[in-house]
Image (spheres, rainbow, N blue to C red):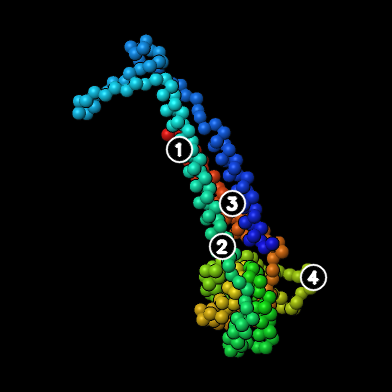
């Protein structure tokens, strides 16, 4: 089961437990005890019973209405019942709106409906990359990346060793790579891609790769799918920005990975935010009803 599907199942479980409880709470006692006003002392000696109400209309017509204690109480109870029903309906609509918003976010963030690459698409894209002058080893890795596509999100691990211009400080991230990163982030965000982590490597505990020189930075990037990644890196917009990367990278390792456990995801942040807003609006709805009583 994919992470997106597990998130939907969890959210549906929470909603299934909260909404019925809200409905039950709203239906438990739709009536409310109220103190009925006393009739005027000169009518029926100030006691409830059969009363005759006489009114003079705007045109001078006189109208009369027979009022009994039962009709007044029934009107009061019907008002309370209808008011409670309207409140419950409003609260359910409020919950449904935020549920739809979250599902819409998941559909965009997880790319619902996106299919893996077909064999024909793999050949077409590989030919396009080969025409850009990619060496055989990189082309082989690129084909493997496409063939392993399952339509799910993946993460790209970047290990960078930078090359600095002669007139800039020989540490940190080069200006050219910073400009490259700003351009690429805008491309990624359009398709729900984003950096997850970026940090410097200070030392090694085990191993070391190019230990004598070391890595300058490690970057972990999330992509919605391999299709999004490939569409980005083969676009004219990216190829223009990639020139800044080439002049600022001395050596790099780029490793695609899948997440078996991922707790650093905006899915939970957006879910928590929408739940808090939904609870706040639900509270406002209940307060508004109390004020209108």
Residue for badge 4: 206
Q: Earlier in the sequence, mark 3 or mark 2?
A: 2
Cα distance, mark 4 to mark 2? 41 Å
Residue for badge 3: 272
Q: Do callouts 4 and 3 mark residues in contact (Cβ within 8 Å)?
A: no
Cα distance, mark 3 to mark 2? 17 Å
Residue for badge 2: 107
| Residue pictured at 65% horizontal, 78% vertical | 146
| Residue pictured at 71% horizontal, 75% vertical | 214
Count the numbered circles shown.
4
Q: Is residue 208 above or below residue 68?
A: below
Q: Do callouts 3 and 2 mark residues in contact (Cβ within 8 Å)?
A: no
Residue 158 is at least partly visible in this image: no
Q: Earlier in the sequence, mark 1 or mark 3?
A: 3
Q: Which element type, helix, strand or loop, lies under badge 1?
A: helix
Q: Quadrant of the C terminus?
A: top left
Q: Quadrant of the N terminus?
A: bottom right
Q: Earlier in the sequence, mark 4 or mark 1?
A: 4
Among the 4 quarters of the image, the one containing residue 102:
bottom right
Residue 281 position in % (x across, y down): 50, 45
Residue 192 position in % (x across, y down): 56, 66
Residue sticking out furthest to the top: 45
């Amino acid at each position: 089961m994919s992470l997106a599907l597990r998130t939907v199942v969890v959210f549906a479980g929470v909603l299934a437990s909260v909404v019925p409880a809200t409905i039950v709470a709203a239906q438990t006692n739709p009536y409310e005890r109220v103190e009925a006003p006393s009739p005027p002392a000169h009518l029926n000696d100030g006691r409830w019973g059969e009363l005759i109400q006489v009114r003079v209309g705007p045109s001078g017509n006189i109208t009369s209405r027979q009022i009994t204690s039962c009709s007044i109480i029934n009107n009061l109870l019907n008002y309370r019942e209808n008011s409670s029903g309207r409140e419950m309906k409003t609260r359910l609509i409020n919950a449904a709106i935020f549920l739809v918003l979250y599902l819409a976010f998941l559909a965009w963030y997880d790319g619902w409906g996106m299919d893996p690459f077909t064999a024909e698409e793999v050949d077409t894209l590989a030919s396009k990359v080969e025409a850009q002058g990619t060496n055989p080893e990189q082309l082989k890795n690129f084909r493997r990346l496409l063939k392993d596509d399952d339509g799910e999100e993946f993460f790209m691990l970047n290990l960078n060793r930078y090359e600095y211009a002669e007139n800039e400080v020989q540490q940190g991230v080069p200006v050219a790579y910073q400009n490259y990163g700003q351009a690429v982030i805008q491309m990624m965000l359009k398709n729900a891609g984003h950096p997850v982590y970026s940090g410097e490597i200070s030392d090694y505990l085990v191993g070391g790769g190019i230990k004598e020189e070391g890595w300058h930075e490690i970057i972990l990037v999330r992509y919605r799918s391999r299709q999004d990644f490939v569409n980005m890196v083969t676009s004219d917009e990216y190829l223009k920005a990639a020139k800044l990367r080439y002049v600022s990278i001395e050596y790099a390792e780029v490793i695609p990975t899948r997440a078996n456990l991922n707790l650093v995801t905006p899915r939970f942040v957006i879910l928590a935010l929408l739940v808090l807003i939904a609870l706040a609006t639900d509270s406002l709805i209940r307060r508004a009803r109390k004020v209108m009583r």
